[in-house]
Image: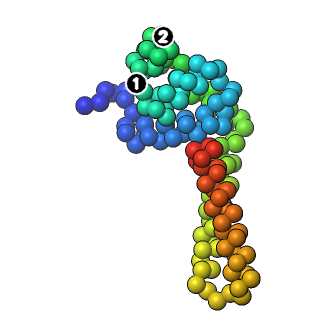
Amino acid sequence: MSTPHAPKPENRLETSVEMATLCAFYGGLLTDKQRQAVLLHYEEDYSLGEIAEQLGCTRQSVHELITRSGEKLRSYENAIGAAERMRQVVERLENAAALLKSLTGRTLPPEAQREAEDVLRLIEQTIEQEENDHGI
């Protein structure tokens, strides 16, 4: 049974993905302690007690640290918007890749087919690199 203030599992997952993504973009703007707490909590799924033990502080201070750090990350994204822009770019690349894939099986001149396959490969590599770099 969950406590009244515990997030629903789907919200917890969404929050974890959001925070991990924002930390990938703006984590360098946090202190080492803030970044470590956020990554341990959202990426490694450590409890507040486990993080407190690792950082040598109280659960309450870890909670406040994570809360403030999350607010900072969200304020950076609101001001800069890099994560959202990257998400949109990846979405457009995925749409372009789908269009290129739809050409498969159609009768195209061999040179056009090779070029379409080359472009598709470049798009897929770019998407994969962005996902690895930023967790999008």
Give the SS element for disc 2: loop
What residue lies at 71% left-to-right and 35% top-to-bottom? Answer: 79
Disc 1 residue type?
Answer: Ser
Asked where in the image residue 120 lies, by quadrant, the reply is: bottom right
The mark lying in front, picked from 1 and 2, is 2
Label 1 packing within 10 angstroms: few (<14), some (14-19), many (20+) = some
Q: In the image, which disc is placed on residue 56?
A: 2
| In the displayed structure image, the side of residue 18 where residue 111 appears, left or right | right
Could you tell me residue 62's position as x and y percent? 49, 17
Q: In the image, which disc is placed on residue 47?
A: 1
Could you tell me residue 29's position as x and y percent? 69, 26
Quadrant in which the N terminus appears: top left
- Structure colour scheme: rainbow
Which residue is at the far top?
57
What residue lies at 29% left-to-right and 30% top-to-bottom? Answer: 2
Could you tell me residue 13's position as x and y percent? 44, 40
Residue 67 in view (yes/no): no
| In the displayed structure image, the side of residue 58 where residue 130 appears, left or right | right
Compared to residue 7, the image places residue 130 above or below, namely below
Residue 119 in view (yes/no): yes
